[in-house]
Amino acid sequence: MSLLVIGSVAFDAIDTPFGSTGKIVGGAASYISLATSLLHDQVGLVAVVGEDFDFNFVETLNQRGVNTDGLQVKKGEKSFFWHGKYHLDMNSRDTITTELNVLGDFDPIIPDSQSAPHFVMLGNLSPQVQLKTIERISQKPKLVVMDTMNFWMDIALDELKEVIAKVDVLTINDEEARQLSGEYSLRKAARIIQAMGPQTLIIKKGEHGALLFGTDDQVFFCPALPLEEVFDPTGAGDTFAGGFVGYLASKGATDFESMKKAVVYGSALASFCVEKFGTERLESVTHDELNARLSQFEKMMTV
Amino acid sequence: MSLLVIGSVAFDAIDTPFGSTGKIVGGAASYISLATSLLHDQVGLVAVVGEDFDFNFVETLNQRGVNTDGLQVKKGEKSFFWHGKYHLDMNSRDTITTELNVLGDFDPIIPDSQSAPHFVMLGNLSPQVQLKTIERISQKPKLVVMDTMNFWMDIALDELKEVIAKVDVLTINDEEARQLSGEYSLRKAARIIQAMGPQTLIIKKGEHGALLFGTDDQVFFCPALPLEEVFDPTGAGDTFAGGFVGYLASKGATDFESMKKAVVYGSALASFCVEKFGTERLESVTHDELNARLSQFEKMMTV
């Protein structure tokens, strides 16, 4: 079934203890689209870039079957740019530069041919743009999945809650779940956040895995693969979300049992993402590699 | 098969955001024995207390089938005492008081009838005492499991490594695994620690579950149950270890598949431990409750 992805397509510069990149392709929707394209072939992307963007990446997406008719290119403008530096433990990072550029007044235009998607993935973006996207979809989708971050909780909580009320699945990390709910216990936090709207909540815990909370107190836990080395965590959460929604869209499924599988797919894809800088590893993952990693997850989880 | 438990049996005083206890029974071996006694009936305890100890607790252990012939009572002396205060997040704590008392010169005497146990659980204690215990066992056990903590890494690393070299399974938390190995990646840390001696390493991650590393890069992950409230984390790691070794001793098993199940038993018992202060909840857990919780774990882990 058709899947519409919206989010940032941008430039990143990343400093880690292992080295630094120059300007490379980043952005939530870049990672999401790449992840979904491994699992599904009916993916459309809505985003905005400046004319400085690396259009080889757009071609890569097209070759992988992602429809980029909804990607706006702003003449004479620059793409969103983020420069971040990871601490030694790779679990925390500082933002060195954020240049909004084209994202500052992003008006998401959904191509007519994609205006009634079955599945929608709202990648991390301002709640205002996420809301506009929902309003511009002509038919109620089977499932709307939303990712966001603490930044929007700090500066636009009311608008954020307005979007959250309209989605089916919210994916945030543990600190964000605590911030949004005001509860330290993730079980209590889940209940409070579910009462804000989404039937399903996914709490991403990075190296500690992911928790899936459904209705009727259903809980599923998917571990993260213990890796030799986390080379660059950028985009892992986006990749997770992309794998999650890509799997569901490919099956046309929204039931809890399918969501459990989808969380494992998201976790498996995220485990590749962190192995190299930026989108590099994700672009090279083969179906055989993915299947081998899914087997590793199964082994690790089976009593 | 017979299981010998050695460790501290002591008094604790615990301050949490939910309240404070006076002096209550604590100590690694108290939690371990209680946990094992739910799963197994051939458990012997080697420990030392002062004559100030609460001997109702010893009676409780006896009623649960724990043989306390190896529990020394030092006339005119006082039991080990620890007073700790948990921070708001319940994940970190400060030690307010430590009084070694009888633990200062603990000489572990193993009753003759228990000197050839099939399974041995070395609860957290000074490496010197752990080593003496191993030396005083007359026949090589099927499995020796050892728990320890960062404190001994800080002040007695050489002795600690001497014990680690002699055990089959080591249980430590993630920070301790990083400290002991000098590696941040838990996968690399596991390999380094396994090269120190133990074939099997369990890394306890508290609310983030537990990782079991076996030979040939075998990995198993058991989540922690997301709880409404963590009331008092004291003893959760000891309870986990007790459930782990108690399950294996009850089955007479040391293979990796059985260890996976044992980790789930340990996690399930630990999830009870934190629900009330001290050993209170653990003393009241029934087999029906344990089975219900094991089902919850199964649901949470099954794709």
Image: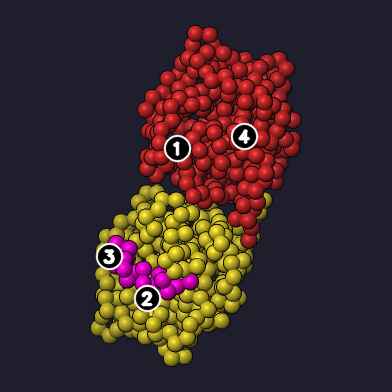
Chain colours: A yellow, B red
**Furthest-bottom residue in view?**
A112
Is the residue under label 2 in contact with that under label 3 (CB below 8 Å)? no
SS for callout 1: helix
Residue behind mark 1: B179
Residue behind mark 2: A130
Spatial CA distance of label 1 from label 4 is 28 Å
Residue behind mark 4: B35
Q: Specify the amino acid type for callout 2.
A: Gln
- Point out the frontmost of discs 1 and 3: 3
Residue behind mark 3: A155
* Left or right of B269 on screen, residue A159: left
Q: Position of residue A293 (x, y in %)?
A: 59, 61
Q: Position of residue B91 (x, y in %)?
A: 43, 42
Spatial CA distance of label 3 from label 2 is 15 Å
Residue A157 visible at all: yes
The one of A1 and B93 positioned closer to us in this rendering: B93
Residue name at image x 49 percent, y 62 percent: A202
